[in-house]
Image: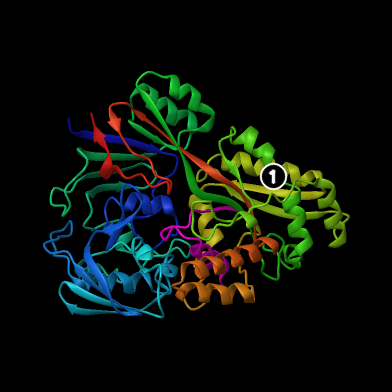
Amino acid sequence: MAEQLRWASATDIATLDPYAHGESFTSGVLAHVFDPLVRRGRTLEIEPALATEWELLDPVTWRFKLREGVKFHNGNPFTADDVIASITRIGDSGSRQRSNVVQIESVTKVDDLTIDIVTKGPSPLLLNDLAGVMIMDKEWMEANDALLPGNLGEGITTAASNEAVGTGPFKVVSYRPDAETNFVVNEDWWDTPQHNITAIQFKPVKSDATRVAALLSGEVDLITPAPLQDLARLESAPGIIVDEEPSLRVLMLALNRRPESQAFPGTPNPLNELKVRQALWHAIDMDSIQKRIMRGKSRNTSTFVAPPVPGYSEANDVPYGYDPELAKKLLAEAGFGDGLKLRLNCTNDRYINDEQICVAISSMWTRIGIETDLQVESRATFFPRQDRGELDVSLTGWATLPSMDGFSMLRSMLADTKDGFGGGNDIAYVHPRIEELTRLAAVELDETKRRGYISEGLAIAGADVAYIPLHQQPVAAAMSDRFDIPQFADEYIRLWYATAK
């Protein structure tokens, strides 16, 4: 029986513009509307999508054959011009996702259904990166003055912020931010549907208790995430299925490295002192957070990527150690023996138990003499400020998307913001050896060497306490047993695989 699926999530879609943000949740929802050239399949392997085949003409030239007969939701035909316009748009300096195409030198049209992509050097992750490039309709963009991307961080909106025209399995029929978004099935989708859903009703429901109550009462069919504290109750409820998966996402604290404190203008930034950063890390009782706040379901980490991700190294993932006395000693050696003031900024609607994590960390830092000004807010106001580099210490997460490779951490979070790199480096972090390793890894085809460069870069970032890694968060969804909805480690909800029973 085919029917509508009602989905309640803790967060809303940030925008309908696929390049105006850097948030994987929004990308995951928009993946129902826009198709890339290649996509992730049921086992997250790369498979053809709008491109049917590809070949390397020389070490830097890739030729892609495009799928025939594909139409956008407005009826416009899909051609090479759309691919060129989309890659140009995402590579624009105002795009929040420009790092995903930093290796692309040029895109040229061979004919209406063939393009050549020339990279700046051998590009081992080109297909991985293209899986995150959603293809938009050039004709629609031209008609609506949307050839350039919006930018949530800078408050720039375009027609694409509120209207989505893709080639994907579902079409947006209504979009009301903070209220409800409705999708209907695209009957003209080029692929053979593996779902039998006719429509999706998406609602943001921030309150854990309200989300759970809505599922239990039958008001909604799917909730994401399922609150950790309610998993046992949900599992025992009749007609409810709980699906838990280990996530690729690592939660960490971002540490501003600008010369001046953002919270206390006119004062030097204490976070530029290595011993202060080390003290902050040693003062956090990771085991307590894992046990009490994450209900034993997270995995503590001391590095920046999860074990399944290429570039992960066990040698980088040695527990830093909870040692408040050592933390006090380090603070004193850094010249802050009499105390220190810091501001910690966090979301309360983005990551699992994000507010509780930050409350706990604030309390732990207070115990070593740090007066912590904790500010908690919605992601809608938090992320633009984080993007603009206005925060000193802030909670962030990274799931290595779209490449699912440790190189994304170097390229986006650790590399300097120049030449298209550093798209997520909101803390102004710069390290000369990491700059070198990032560029070496970008063009290295020998997989052992490539992973070695990534691992070395992550080791340097760990020793330098560029960020403070916390844990690999769990992902859990709860749903009516009337549906079969597969879960994925990248936290994307792929309802084109959902079936009603």
Density class for disc 1 (Cα within 10 Å; few <14, some 14-19, many ≥20) is many
Q: Is residue 148 visible?
A: no
Relative to 110, 324 lies left or right: right
Q: Nearer the viewer, residue 187 or 149?
A: 187
Question: At 23% from the left edge and 64% from the top edge, which residue is drawn?
Answer: 51
Residue 74 location in percent, x, y?
A: 16, 58
Q: Quadrant of residue 163 in the image?
A: bottom left
Question: At 34% from the left edge and 37% from the top edge, which residue is drawn?
Answer: 7
Helix, strand or loop for disc 1: helix
Give the magenta part as a residue range.
Answer: 395-416
Q: Quadrant of the N terminus?
A: top left
Residue 103 location in percent, x, y?
A: 41, 75
Q: Nearer the viewer, residue 63 or 371?
A: 63
Residue 137 location in percent, x, y?
A: 22, 65
Relative to 328, 111 lies left or right: left
Q: Which residue is mark 1?
A: 361
